[in-house]
Image (cartoon, rainbow, N blue to C red):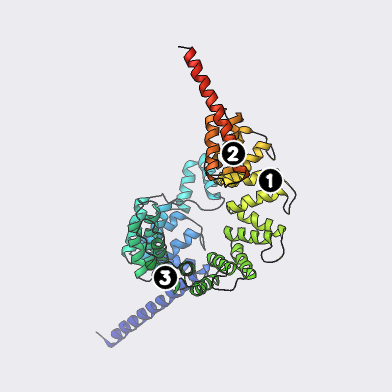
Amino acid sequence: MTGRRRSRMLLGRLLDAAAARFRRRDRRAVLAAVAAADWTAVRDLAALARGGDAEAQYRLGLLHACGQGVVQDMADAAHWLRRAAEQGLPEAQLELGLLHLTGGGAARDDRTLVRWHAAAAARHPAAAAANLALLHPNGLDVPRNVAEGLAWLRRAADGGLAAARVQLGLLHAAGREVERDPEAARGWFLAAAEAGDADAQYLLGGLLAGGQGVEPDAAAAARWYLAAAEQGHAAAQSCLGALYAKGEGVARDYAEARRWYLEAAAQGEASAQFNLALLHAGGHGVPQDYGEALRWFTAAAERGDPTAQFNLGLMHATGMAGRQDPAGALIWYRKAAAGGSVAAQINLGLMYLNSQGVMKDSGEAAQWFLAAARAGSPVAQLNLALLYLRGEGVRQSDAEAARWFRLAAEQGSEQAQLHLGQLHAEGRGVPQDLAQAHAWFSRALATLAPGILRDQVAAQLDRIAARLSGTQAGAMTEAADGR
């Protein structure tokens, strides 16, 4: 081999090495650009993906799933995620598994493409199909396939991906797509928690603290909450604070509770903000300070916590932290009621019924009582029944009154039991039934405190008992005459 030829070969190897180094630098630059939301790099990312780069395939799949930098297309997302998953990338296996568990279609809000394709297919089916295949070779939809989804999740979990283990734990804990199995959930959470995953540590703590299908272990829950809390997990910090406040799994220590609540509250954790408010309102470990309680309730309420919103409304209504503010109470009660707070719905009903800071509006009161009554509140059921009995804010109906009185009475409401007994005695809204009347008055009497009302109910029971005896005697006479 001549010297010139050897020189050319050496130069070629040097150029190839330089090109490889350039490509490696170029790959890193492309991935970094896409991670920084520089969508001009998507074309280069696609080229890397087509060339078999698993990381690029994974990222391109995520972009298609989210519609970032490319047209949102779940089928294209599944295609690229599968390419990466089949190369053993655990993150891609996880995302592909989740995609198959939920299924996915054209996710555009207006589904314009789907509508246009349907319209075109009605006129020219062959052309429409050809165009769709050209534009979306992988289709538009990802069929829901639970078995395949779980298989990919397990492959990712077996590959050591903590997030996949957490997902499998959540599925087993909730009984979604698999049979509910708290022990299996604990196993998956534990595997991820021992690897240092903060979410898994938090979830394992919650499973052990609540004893949700596993043996409760407050001390172990506290240890796992602490592990997650020390990594900055806000929800775990709040839960750890609650254990210190209640003395569960750890010695009661309000100072420690407050410390962890403050850590979580600084991250915007509404439950911690709410619990800080309770500490200050009750003077637990800190001087009682309704002003501080108001401040923390407000912070939690502004983050959408319905219970905090209700308590904030209550503080405004009662003037606990200063002057009474019915308008402020109304605002926060409405927010809490819209978030499902039954207590707020009842208080709103009472405000409108009794003109507390608002114009009296019995119809509005009835609507709020109805919402709380449907949620099972005996207080709301009683108040709604009284409105039907009086025909106030609703069309008068003894039958509706009896229905709601019965629901409240069955939950132990003495007033509802007395009203229901009276309706049965008079045959209003229900068939007259002295035995039922006697039964409901007796239930109320059993729990009434000594006093005038109890004496009146006892006297009513005696009268009903006498009427019952007379009725039974009459029935016996009629039976004897018929022999």
Residue 183 percent coordinates (x, y): 33, 58
Q: Is residue 32 above or below residue 75?
A: below
> Mark 1 packing: few (<14 Cα in 10 Å), some, or many (20+)?
some
Label whose residue precedes the other's in the sequence (1 or 2): 1
Task: Indicate which label's residue lies in the foreground, 3 or 2.
Answer: 2
Q: Residue furthest left?
A: 1
Residue 401 percent coordinates (x, y): 61, 36
In the rendered image, which residue does mark 1 sit on?
A: 364
Secondary structure beneath dot 2 equals: helix
> Mark 3 packing: few (<14 Cα in 10 Å), some, or many (20+)?
some
Q: Residue furthest bottom?
A: 3
Q: CA distance from mark 3 to mark 1?
A: 48 Å
In the rendered image, which residue does mark 2 sit on?
A: 457
Q: Nearer the viewer, residue 181 or 475?
A: 475
Location of residue 162 (image quadrant): bottom left
Residue 258 percent coordinates (x, y): 52, 72
Q: Is residue 397 above or below residue 67?
A: above
Q: Is residue 464 left or right of residue 320?
A: left
Q: Is residue 15 above or below residue 321?
A: below
Q: Quadrant of the N terminus?
A: bottom left
In the rendered image, which residue does mark 3 sit on?
A: 250
The amino acid pointed to by label 1 is Glu
